[in-house]
Amino acid sequence: MTTLTDQAPRGGRSPALRALAFALPAVAALALLAFVSLLVGVSDVSVTTLLRLFSHNDDDLATQVLVASRVPRTLALLLAGSAMAVAGLLMQMLARNHYVEPTTMGTAESAGMGMLIGILWWPDMPVFGKMGLAAVFALAGTALFLAVLSRIRLRSALIVPLVGLVLSGVIESATTFIAYRFDLMQAARSWMTADFSAIVQGRYEMLWLSLGITALAMLAADRFTVAGMGQDFATNLGLNYKRLVAQGVLVVAVVTASVIVTVGIIPFVGLIVPNLVRLVVGDNVRKSVLWVAWAGALMALACDLIGRVVIAPYEIPIGTVMGVLGSAMFLALLLSRRKRMRG
């Protein structure tokens, strides 16, 4: 696939200058949305309030809202969006299919079941314990998906996500049944739809863990690119394919668990973002992973802002906004792929 970075230099500009020409507007767009995210909300926070932070004057209500709520919420959006997008990219490379992500292959639903089991049997478990239990269930759910997938001989582009959606539906139904039987439906709903309105200082810091794990995945981008070319190709290059797959699945499981424990399930980010970036940058994980992280953060910020302004002063959860926009973008991607195949 011809990509922007593979094209011949134009107008005498070096690859570094061309990369800088794309990076500067991208960083500016992300900074602009993050800045707007700090200002939008029920409480009145202005640019003057932002400037007060540098004067260490945190006595007034607006400054306290900014420090305790708006800054943590914006950071959580950046961390969760980028982490879920990179997790989706890794899962697509490991499954060798462009239409899978943690929410369409049972990973997120398995993590939700782990959360429910933790609340049911160990209600006083600390947050890190819940995240660990959710990560174990997410790991088991992902391994189950890959095991089922390995037994399917006809692995067309649409069969793989269909298998994942069926598995996700079964796990979610079992979770809902258990929650209904033990009168925990309200608790289960709290993480089935992502919502950043409850994010305040002290309730989002776990997402920094997902940032660290995502950074490690970026360092191993070349190896995951090779793993995406198949077991025979990776083995011929001297790599341990099964170990790479296990590492990738572990990264996806921990990232998904940390996001779900903090804000709930965010659909479509890991599906839409890698596919959009792939259309421009190509399939090389090393070249695309930073763009995927950037686009995931940008999409999370944009969808959260839409949810905050559409029915202000009330809010629509980001999971609902992402579900509506993501499904429309997913259909557009499928139709454009069909058009390209015909062309």
Image: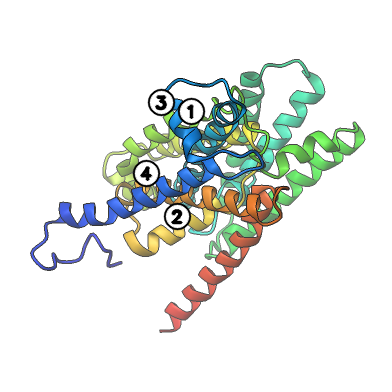
Q: How is the image coloured?
A: rainbow
Gap in Å between the C-alphas at discs 2 and 1?
21 Å
Closer to the chain start, of discs 2 and 3, is 3
Residue at 50% in and 77% down: 338
Which residue is label 2 attached to?
Answer: 274
The tag on residue 224 is 4
Look at discs 2 and 1 and give the one toward the viewer: 1
Residue at 13% in and 64% down: 9
Q: Secondary structure at mark 1?
A: helix
Gap in Å between the C-alphas at discs 4 and 2?
14 Å
Closer to the chain start, of discs 1 and 3, is 3
Residue located farthest toward the left when viewing the structure as drawn: 12
Q: Secondary structure at mark 2?
A: helix
Q: Residues within 10 Å of mark 3 (few under 14, many from 20)?
A: few
Q: Secondary structure at mark 3?
A: helix
Which residue is label 3 attached to?
Answer: 54
Which residue is label 1 attached to?
Answer: 208
Q: Mark 3: which amino acid?
A: Phe
Quarter-of-image position of residue 202: top right
Which quarter of the image is occupied by the N terminus? bottom left
